Image (spheres, rainbow, N blue to C red):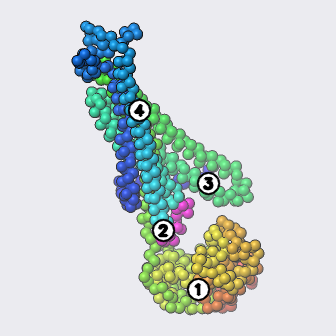
């Protein structure tokens, strides 16, 4: 199997730097943020209440010894009383150890009734706390998720807005799937960060601080003797962080390799089936999948060790609480209620720590995605020269000693010079890779030249507002891209201010009606994905109609008739005749396309080597003559 190229991503920005960039989006919603933080704090405080309520119920109303004093011949309950209520056989007595006085059941019931009422009151308070917990948890969860979704929406919109302004050269070297992943998957990872981490992480910080306070408040004795588990927790967490980061990066790398394999081979499925390569490709896919499986198993081992380790540390801490707490109870230093509350707080303390593995992975994923998003946002924008010239004085094009390279000094065009007057129809021909299409891209201002000058209407291209310039230049490519929607919308580019009647009138001028009429809904027919319902020639006629509709003064045809049948080529030629007065520049592979043009430029290895009409070039018997003879077997 050929070695798979795995996309690796090493973090270069610190977490604080990434968070500060995220903060610029978060702070817009500061009111929601404050509300969410207040609700988180309230929720954390309410979580601390139930153990205290249960402790009071145990110590004050369940496991309580009532004491009394005899005052004016009546028994009165007193906290420091010397007589205690005890039960012997089926009777109740008040005794101080020396004397005993029998009391009737009515007296005992009145005492217990008070305890029942206090327990009922405590139970009602407990229910109120639970309802308040529900309300505060719902409130902070909803508000935090709402904040997260708004932030992710803003980032996604800013990212797409930025992508629309990035120079075309960026898209030449960046896979489409990678860009789509930034907009869809990486922003979704940020969404999960807000919904799964932030909603609990901030609350957990409040909660742990509150738990430590309550533990110290309940019993400094117990707290001091159970704090030895804290270094164990910190050590285990740091070790987990190191190993999990390595395992996580390996898994992400292998997932990227799997995605790349699937993207490449699904796109080339027809080739795989034609040459019966299914078995071989299945084997290659199995190898890529096995690499991912092994990486995931390594990560599972890290998780499988960390979670039980946290449980072991938790139970060690719990054993310490029970041991020292039991001694405290036996010595009369602690109550059962305090021990219960302490055990509850220890359990609450470990809950967020047990989940730290999952939260840490989400946090890593989110910050890695955020860094990728911000790296894309840091890609320099195309300089549109807003405020520059907006109108072409005349539809002429001139190249003066132009040198151009896509990368470094690997020159694609070398010292190119030519001048095309307004209304002229010229063609560029040559072998594949000679530089013909690069000339087209430079006329549209899609790339910047390294040397020389390009003049449009006698004005340097750099002086134009590129958006205004491109509105006056129409491009018809070999593979015309159409958006999902109707034929009508693809011609008027979803500009509803342009009437259907105007579009249909232009369609008739460029002979598009001949094709549109075969669809039941005419111009309202939907274009499927990648315009599979239209042939290459029909898509080119749609592009010609679009250029005519928007009043293009310069028309660029890049191999427009290379993949069309003779009949469709005839209609395209008729459509071009309808575009009188437009400066026409044709890139052609089929030389028959340029035979009747005013002038033909022959490009070879990035240079113009011949210029003339078809007849003049044939008479020279140079490169054009050789190309024509090979193509049409003329001698």
Q: Is residue 604 visible?
A: no
Q: Position of residue 365 (x, y in %)?
A: 46, 50
Q: Which residue is mark 1?
A: 551
**Mark 2 and mark 4 residues within 8 Å of each other at the beta carbon:** no
Q: Position of residue 460 (x, y in %)?
A: 46, 86
**Mark 1 and mark 2 residues within 8 Å of each other at the beta carbon:** no
| Magenta span includes 254 | no
| Boundaries of the magenta span | 164-181
> Which residue is located at x 50 percent, y 76 percent?
447
Judging from the image, what secondary structure is the residue with disc 2 in? helix
> Which residue is located at x 38 percent, y 48 percent?
39
Labelled disc at residue 123: 4
> Which residue is located at x 41 percent, y 32 percent?
123
Q: Residue furthest front?
A: 72
Q: Give the crowd class for mark 3: few <14, some 14-19, many >=20 residues within 10 Å.
A: few
Give the mark, 3 or 1, whose residue is nearer the N terminus. Answer: 3
Give the mark, 4 or 1, whose residue is nearer the N terminus. Answer: 4
- The residue nearer to you, when weighing 571 against 608, is 571
- Label 4 and label 3: CA atoms lie apart by 60 Å
**Mark 3 and mark 1 residues within 8 Å of each other at the beta carbon:** no
Q: Give the crowd class for mark 2: few <14, some 14-19, many >=20 residues within 10 Å.
A: few
Q: Which residue is mark 2?
A: 161
Labelled disc at residue 262: 3
> Which residue is located at x 56 percent, y 60 percent?
177
- Label 4 and label 1: CA atoms lie apart by 79 Å
């Amino acid at each position: 199997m050929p070695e798979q190229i795995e996309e690796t991503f090493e973090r270069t920005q610190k977490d604080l730097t990434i968070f500060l960039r995220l903060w610029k989006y978060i702070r817009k919603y500061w009111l929601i943020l404050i509300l969410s933080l207040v609700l988180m704090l309230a929720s954390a405080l309410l979580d601390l209440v139930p153990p205290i309520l249960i402790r009071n119920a145990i110590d004050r109303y369940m496991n309580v010894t009532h004491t009394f004093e005899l005052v004016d011949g009546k028994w009165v309950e007193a906290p420091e009383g010397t007589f205690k209520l005890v039960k012997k056989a089926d009777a109740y007595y008040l005794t101080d150890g020396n004397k005993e006085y029998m009391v009737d059941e009515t007296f005992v019931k009145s005492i217990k009734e008070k305890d029942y009422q206090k327990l009922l009151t405590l139970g009602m308070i407990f229910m109120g706390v639970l309802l308040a917990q529900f309300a505060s948890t719902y409130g902070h969860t909803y508000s935090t998720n709402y904040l997260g979704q708004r932030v992710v929406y803003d980032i996604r919109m800013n990212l797409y807005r930025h992508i629309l302004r990035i120079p075309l050269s960026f898209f030449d070297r960046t896979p489409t799937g990678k860009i789509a992943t930034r907009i869809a998957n990486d922003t979704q990872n940020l969404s999960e960060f807000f919904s799964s981490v932030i909603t609990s992480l901030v609350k957990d910080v409040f909660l742990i601080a509150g738990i430590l306070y309550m533990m110290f408040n309940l019993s400094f004795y117990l707290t001091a003797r159970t704090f030895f588990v804290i270094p164990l927790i910190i050590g285990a967490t740091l070790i987990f962080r190191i190993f999990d980061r390595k395992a996580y990066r390996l898994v992400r790398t292998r997932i990227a390799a799997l995605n790349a394999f699937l993207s490449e081979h699904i796109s080339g499925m027809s080739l795989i089936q034609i040459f019966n390569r299914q078995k071989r490709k299945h084997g290659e896919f199995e190898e890529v999948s096995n690499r991912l499986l092994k990486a995931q198993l390594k990560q599972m081992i890290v998780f499988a060790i960390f979670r039980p380790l946290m449980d072991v540390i938790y139970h060690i801490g719990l054993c310490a609480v029970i041991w020292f707490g039991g001694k405290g109870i036996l010595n009369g230093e602690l109550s059962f209620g305090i021990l219960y509350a302490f055990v509850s707080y220890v359990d609450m303390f470990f809950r967020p720590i047990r989940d730290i593995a999952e939260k840490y992975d989400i946090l890593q994923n989110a910050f890695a995605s955020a860094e990728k998003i911000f790296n894309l946002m840091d890609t320099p924008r195309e300089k549109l020269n807003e405020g520059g010239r907006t109108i072409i004085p005349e539809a002429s094009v001139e190249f003066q000693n132009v040198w151009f390279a896509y990368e470094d000094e690997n020159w694609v065009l070398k010292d190119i010079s030519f001048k095309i007057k307004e209304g002229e129809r010229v063609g560029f021909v040559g072998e594949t890779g000679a530089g013909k299409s690069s000339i087209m891209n430079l006329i549209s201002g899609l790339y910047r030249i390294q040397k020389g000058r390009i003049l449009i209407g006698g004005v340097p291209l750099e002086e134009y507002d590129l958006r205004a310039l491109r509105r006056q230049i129409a491009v018809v490519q070999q593979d015309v891209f159409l958006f999902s929607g109707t034929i009508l919308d693809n011609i008027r580019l979803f500009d509803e201010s342009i009437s259907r009647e105007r579009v249909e009138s232009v369609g008739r001028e460029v002979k598009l009606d001949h094709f549109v009429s075969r669809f039941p809904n005419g111009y309202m027919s939907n274009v499927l994905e990648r315009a599979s319902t239209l042939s290459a020639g029909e898509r080119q006629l749609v592009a010609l109609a679009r250029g005519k509709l928007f009043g293009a003064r310069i028309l660029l045809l890049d191999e427009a008739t290379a993949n069309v049948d003779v009949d469709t080529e005839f209609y395209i030629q008729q459509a071009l005749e309808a575009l009188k007065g437009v400066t026409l520049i044709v890139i052609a592979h089929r030389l028959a396309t340029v035979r009747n043009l005013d002038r033909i430029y022959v490009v070879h290895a990035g240079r113009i080597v011949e210029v003339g009409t078809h007849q003049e070039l044939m008479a020279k018997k140079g490169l054009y003559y050789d190309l024509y003879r090979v193509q049409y077997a003329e001698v």
